[in-house]
Image: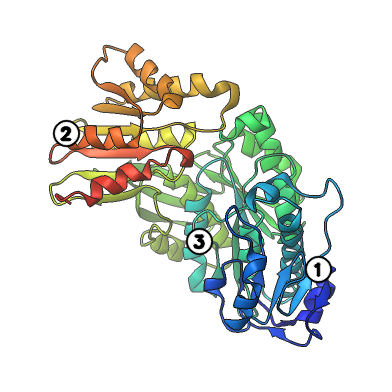
Amino acid sequence: MISLSLAEIASIVGGRLHGTDGSPIVTGSVEFDSRKLTPGGLFLALPGEKVDGHSFAARAVEAGAAGVLAAREVDAPAVIVPPLAPGQAHERSVALTADRDGAGAAVLAALGKLARHVVTVLSQRQLTVVGVTGSSGKTSTKDLIAQLLEPLGPTVAPPGSFNNELGHPWTALRADETTRHLVLEMSARGPGHIAELAAIAPPRIGVVLNVGSAHVGEFGSREGIAKTKGELVEALPAEGLAVLNYDDPLVKAMASRTKARIVGVGEHPDAGVRAEDITLDEQARASFRLVTAHGEAPVTLPLYGEHHVGNALSAAAVALELGSSVAEVAARLSSVERRSARRMEVTTRADGVTVLNDSYNANPESVRAALKALASMSRGGQRRSWAVLGVMGELGADSVSAHDEIGRLAVRLNIGKLVVVGADAAAMHQGASHEGSWGEESVLVPDAGAAVELLREQLSPGDVVLVKASKVAELWRVADALLEDGVA
C-alpha cells in the first residue's frame, strides 16, 4: 500500500495510538497472518476460532511489522480502533472472524476505512478499479481480466475467491503508487453487501456476469439476487462503464440502474462485444469469433467449458475499455492460464483417466455448465464419463427441485455414471433414477470416502471424471485421492 505513519492511520480509521508516538511508517503489506508479514508491514489483530491475533501482536512487531491495528491494547506499537455501536457489526464480519466481543468487526471496519483512503488517493493518480460480481464465474472472470490487463500496467487482483469483508480491503491495500489496475471480486449474501464493498473501493468499471440461484435461500428469489448484484452498477460514476451480460435478461435489465456507459456482452445480437461461430474441441475448449465495434478476431480459449466464453467476453470488454486492441485481446485470451485451484482443473493420470476437478463450489448454473463440459469431453460416449456430485448449498426451498433437475440433466446428457455424495444431495440420485431407464447408472454414497472407494474399484483407463459440489461437501478430497493414487 502507500506509505503511511501510524499517526496518519489512526486519523484515517478514527483510532488512538498506543505504545507509540505515531512516527513509525507502514511501508510493507497489511497482513492478518503474522507469518506473512514483510518488514514495515501492518499486522491486523483479528480473533479466530482457535487463536486471537491480539496474542501475536508483539511477535508480529518483532518480525518487522511497523505496528498493529487492534481492538484493544496489546504489547506492541498499535492503533486501537473504537468499538462499533450496537447494531453496526456486520453479521458476515462476526462469522468471518469468530467474533465474540465485537473486536473482529471493529478491526474489519477500520480496515475498510484504510482501504477506502488508499484507493481514493491512488484513483486520483492512475488507478482504475474494476469490480466483478455474479452468481457464478466471478473468480474465473477476475483471473481473465487480470491477465488481459497486466500487459497494460501493474495489476492487483485477489488470490482465489478472497472476496469478502476481509479479502476485499486486504486486496485493495495491495495497490501502491505503481498500480494501474485493481480487479476486485465482489460477493454477497444479502442486500447491501455489494454496496458496502463498492464503498470501500469505488469501482470505475463494473462487470455483472449473471443472476443464478446461488444463495437464493438467503435472498428469497432470483429477482432479489438481481437487486443486490445491481448494486455494483449503481455505484459506478457517470464516467464509468457497466459491462452487462446481455444473454441474461435480469442482468441486461440493470442498464436502467446506472448512470455509467454500458457495454453489452454475449451472443445477443445487441451485444457490443459478442461471440459468434462458437465451437468446442474434444476437450470442451471453445473457439469463437470475437466481434466488436472496432473489429473482430478469432479466439481459441485454453480453458475447459463453453461457459468460459461469456467470462472471456466480459474480460475483453474491460481490456478494450482500458486501451487494448481487438487483436491484442484475442491473442491474450488465446494464451490465458487457469489461476485459481479447483475450478475446471483438468489432469490426466498415467493410465489415461482424466479428472475434472471443479470442486471449489457449486450452484445449479455452474453444475449444468460442468456437466455439459463433461459430456463434451466424453466424445459422444467414446470415453466413459463419471459425474461425482455433492450438495449445492444455500438453495432454500428450491433445494430438492434443483438437485432433482441436476440428476435428470445428467441422464439427458448421457453421462455414463452418476455418483451422488451425501444425503443432502439425495434428490440428484432420485431425479436421475426417475429419468429415462436409469438404474445402476446412478448411485448414492454416504460420503467422500465411499465415493473414492467406488471409483477405485470401477474406474477404467480412459474414463473422465467430474468432481463438483459446494465447499461444505469438501469433494476436493475425492479429486485429490484419485490423483494421488499409485497409478497417477
Instruction: Measuring from the top left, give residue 437's x and y in whole percent.
Output: 26, 11
Does any portion of residue 280 appear in the rendered image? no
The residue labelled by disc 3 is 159
Dot 1 or dot 2: first in sequence order is 1
Q: What's under tag 1, amino acid-wise? A: Val
Position of residue 282 in the picture relative to residue 373 (left or right): left
Q: Of 255 and 230, which appears nearest the observer?
A: 230
Circle 3 SS class:
loop
On the image, which quarter does residue 391 sit in?
top left
Q: Amino acid at mark 3?
A: Pro
**Image quarter hosting the N terminus:** bottom right
Answer left or right for 287 relative to 405: left
What is the x, y in percent for residue 83?
A: 83, 58
Badge 2 local density, few (<14 within 10 Å), some, or many (20+)? Answer: few
Pointer 2 with pointer 3, Cβ within 8 A: no
Mark 1, Cα crowd under 10 Å, few <14 / some 14-19 / many 20+, is many
The residues bearing labels 3 and 1 have C-alpha atoms spaced at a distance of 26 Å
